[in-house]
Image (tube, rainbow, N blue to C red):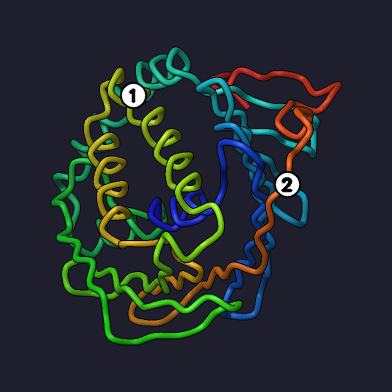
């Protein structure tokens, strides 16, 4: 869900000194724990998962997705997004035609497989509500906020007021910059459903009223995963932190795999 991704990004950057953020995502079934490290400085970002499976770098209005497995990367900018849309639109139109004949059960199953709402489907009513529940996570006093879709709980986040966290103003500004670039990219392609989803998630995040230090995702009323802030520090980073590793090969993201 985009709101969880934005929750991490809003804890990620500063315009002067850099910020390093460490969060831990736990699969509550006990299957897997993933550490996510985020570096940010001067409007640039680097997000890396551990085990070291992938890295995302954002700089110069371009998003780079890096694969360490085969030492390659792809670059996503406005031009590549437009080319991708031109190739995907026919397939999306076919999918929307197919959905017209699906039963509600078939639609629900496909949404579950794809991890979200299908394009062209009925928009779910989303509600964000601040509760009276409070907690203290890694030294930060926070208040729980619930996210519901069609009345069903999908996420709960423990939110810290922006002025209570180190470098909060810069963090918010950096996240908004990335969101603005994404919105501009999407505005140039024929994917109104995707643009609407992006805009809605950013609007919803603004409604949280602060910065989440913990987020918990639910499915069918049961908690599935939890992401928690474990550490945040400020320091100046070398420019190489936000560069593609030497020797990595650029790949066309639209090329057949």
Q: Which residue is drawn at 77% across and 20% down?
A: 249
Work out whether residue 103 or residue 220 is closer to the camera in this orientation and state it: 220
Q: Which of marks 2 and 1 is nearer the N terminus?
A: 1
**Height in image: 222 above or below 109?**
below
Residue annotated with mark 1: 184
Residue 120 versus residue 154 in the image, above or below: above
Is residue 79 placed above or below 116 in the rendered structure? above
Q: Position of residue 34 (x, y in %)?
A: 68, 63
Question: Looking at the image, which residue sits at the far right?
Answer: 247
Total marks placed: 2
The answer to whether 54 appears left or right of 13 in the picture is right
Q: In which quarter of the image is the C terminus?
A: top right
| Disc 2 packing (10 Å; few <14; some 14–19; many ≥20) | some
The residue pinned by badge 2 equals 235
Task: Name the residue rendered at 19%, 52% in the picture.
Answer: 102
Which residue is at 23% across, 64% downward? Answer: 105
Give the foreground label among 2 and 1.
Answer: 2
- Find numbered disc 2 in the image and state the secondary structure of the residue it sits on: strand
Asked whether disc 2 touches disc 1, contact meaning CB atoms under 8 Å apart, the reply is no
* Residue 155, quarter of picture: bottom left
How far, Cα to Cα, is label 2 from label 1?
A: 31 Å
Question: Measured along the vertical axis of the image, is residue 20 above or below residue 98?
Answer: below
Under circle 1, the secondary element is: helix
Where's residue 220, x and y in %?
34, 77
Q: Position of residue 27 (x, y in %)?
A: 59, 73
Q: On the rendered image, what quadrant is the N terminus found in?
A: bottom left
């Amino acid at each position: 869900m985009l709101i969880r991704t934005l929750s991490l990004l809003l804890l990620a950057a500063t315009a002067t000194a850099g910020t390093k953020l460490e969060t831990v995502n736990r699969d509550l079934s006990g299957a897997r724990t993933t550490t996510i490290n985020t570096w940010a400085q001067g409007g640039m970002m680097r997000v890396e998962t551990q085990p070291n499976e992938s890295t995302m770098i954002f700089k110069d209005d371009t998003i780079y997705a890096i694969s360490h497995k085969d030492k390659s990367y792809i670059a996503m900018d406005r031009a590549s997004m437009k080319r991708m849309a031109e190739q995907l639109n026919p397939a999306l139109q076919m999918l929307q035609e197919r959905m017209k004949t699906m039963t509600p059960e078939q639609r629900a199953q496909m949404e579950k497989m794809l991890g979200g709402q299908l394009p062209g489907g009925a928009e779910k009513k989303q509600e964000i509500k601040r509760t009276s529940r409070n907690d203290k996570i890694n030294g930060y006093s926070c208040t729980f906020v619930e996210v519901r879709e069609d009345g069903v709980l999908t996420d709960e986040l423990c939110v810290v007021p922006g002025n209570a966290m180190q470098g909060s103003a810069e963090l918010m500004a950096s996240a908004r910059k990335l969101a603005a670039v994404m919105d501009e990219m999407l505005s140039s392609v024929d994917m109104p459903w995707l643009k609407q989803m992006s805009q809605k998630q950013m609007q919803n995040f603004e409604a949280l009223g602060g910065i989440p230090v913990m987020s918990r995702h639910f499915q069918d009323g049961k908690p599935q995963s939890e992401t928690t802030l474990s550490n945040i520090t400020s320091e100046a980073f070398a420019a190489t932190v936000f560069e593609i590793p030497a020797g990595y090969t650029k790949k066309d993201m639209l090329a057949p795999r």
